[in-house]
Each structure stands twice: as structure tokens, then as C-alpha cells.
Amino acid sequence: MLRVLAVDDEVPALEELAYLLRQDERIEHVTTAADGVTALQDMVQMIGGGERLDGVFLDVRMPGLDGLDLARLVSGFPSPPRLVFVTAHEECAVQAFELEAVDYLLKPVRAERLAEAVRRLEAAACPAPQQGQDDVIPVELGGRTRFVPQQAVRFAEAKGDYVRLHTVDGSYLVRMSLAALERRWSEAGFLRIHRSTLVSARHVSELRFDGGRVTLTVGTETLQVSRRHSRQVREQLVRHPRNVIS
């Protein structure tokens, strides 16, 4: 169970965020603060008094001590709580990368998107033990079977009833749907960037914004992110440090 602090200078937005957080069964307790200074004081008091604080849901633009400055101060704590930015300002995502935020939500916050942020916060605050070996996909190659490890796959493309797995050593065609592969590997950091493309976040070396277009560099490939998936992909990649070009 998580104990969190929600910070926003807009009272209606703060009340709505706190309400949604309290509806999540993974949240044990929600404290609120209407400005950065009060939030900092609350955190010092809680942590100094031995109270557990797992995460902070933090607005960016606030008068006085804004969210980014507050996050930098929090990073100096001996055991800092994890950060989730909640903002109407999409352009602050790059700075969120640098501050190692768990997630970056854009207002208005959707309940299902907030639930995903809570899942990430829970995973970061209470990491699960390693689950055995890396998953593998068996590939038939002319009478031979090659086992392609999940970690070696940079991205996957739908090809009719098949999926082509792209690795550093080559590509392999397997008979399965992209949707099935997404369900199987979603918890391992594979992101849907297009209706026909699934990408491993660990292999993304660059995220580029060019007007309304978003592209990813994966190995030697440049992959286009569809408009439908661009917002989700940018939000999901916040938890992984990236080279970001705008």
C-alpha cells in the first residue's frame, strides 16, 4: 500500500486528483498541499518524523516554488520519494526525464491513465524480485529451432498473421499476432508506437519531436510514432532516461 502527497495550486484540480487517488485500492493514504513551500514543509515533517512517503504527484507550474524546483530539492533527500508529474504543460517532459520521474501525466487526468501511473509508482517504490530467466520466442529456421531472447528484440512488426522480430543479429519471422506479443511483453517495457509496430523501451536511444511528428531511434532504425500513440509513448518513456531532441 502506498502513501502519497498530491501538490497543485489549483484547488479543483488538487481535489479531483486526491479523489481519484483515494479510489485506488493500492493507495493507503493521500496528503495534499496547495503550493510548493507547504509541500516541502510537509515532506520534511513526514520523513523527519519517520513517516513513510512513497510518492509525490506534483504539478509543474506553481507560484513561488514550482514543481521542477521542488523536485530538485526532493532529489537531495537521503531516501527521496518517487515523483509523478501532473501538468498541462507538455514541453516540460525533457526536464522530467532528467529528474527521473516515474511518470508524466497531462491534464485533464484520465482515471485509467492515473491508474497506470500508480502501477508504475508501486513498481518503483516496491520493486518485485527478479522473475527467473528472460522470456524467449522459438523460431523455426529450416529444420532448426532458434530461441530468440526477449532482451535481444529491438522492435517487432506485424506482417499479416506473422510478426517479424528485429534484433542486433538479424530479423526472424514468427507465427503469432502483434497483439498477443504485446500482451506477453508489455510488463517488460515493450511499447505500441503504431498499429503495426511494437518497440522495446530499453533499445530506444533517441526520442525526437519535430512539430507534430514523433520519431524514435532504435539501433540504426528511425521509427515513426503514430499520432494515436504519440502522447502515450512520450509519457511512457519518461521513466527511462533518453536523448531527447525537439
Image (cartoon, rainbow, N blue to C red):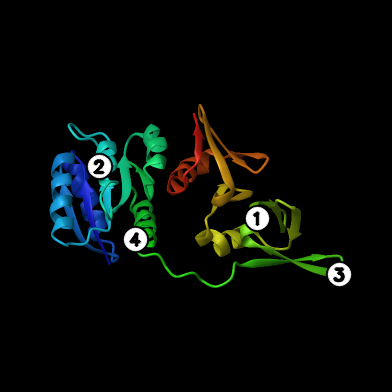
**Amino acid type shown at disc 1:** Val
Expressed as whole percent of the image width and height from the top left, the position of residue 115 reads: 35, 57
Residue shown at 26% from the left, 34% from the top: 61
Residue shown at 39% from the left, 46% from the top: 100
Whether 89 is drawn above or below 49: the answer is above
Mark 3 to mark 1 CA distance (whole Å): 22 Å
Mark 1 to mark 4 CA distance (whole Å): 27 Å
Q: Nearer the viewer, mark 1 or mark 2?
A: 2
Residue 211 - label = none
The residue pinned by badge 3 equals 143
- Of 9 and 70, nearer the camera is 70
Taking the view exactly as shown, the residue that stands out farthest to the right is 142
Mark 2 to mark 4 CA distance (whole Å): 19 Å
Expressed as whole percent of the image width and height from the top left, the position of residue 229 reads: 51, 44
Q: Quadrant of the N terminus?
A: bottom left
**Amino acid type shown at disc 3:** Gly
The residue pinned by badge 4 equals 125
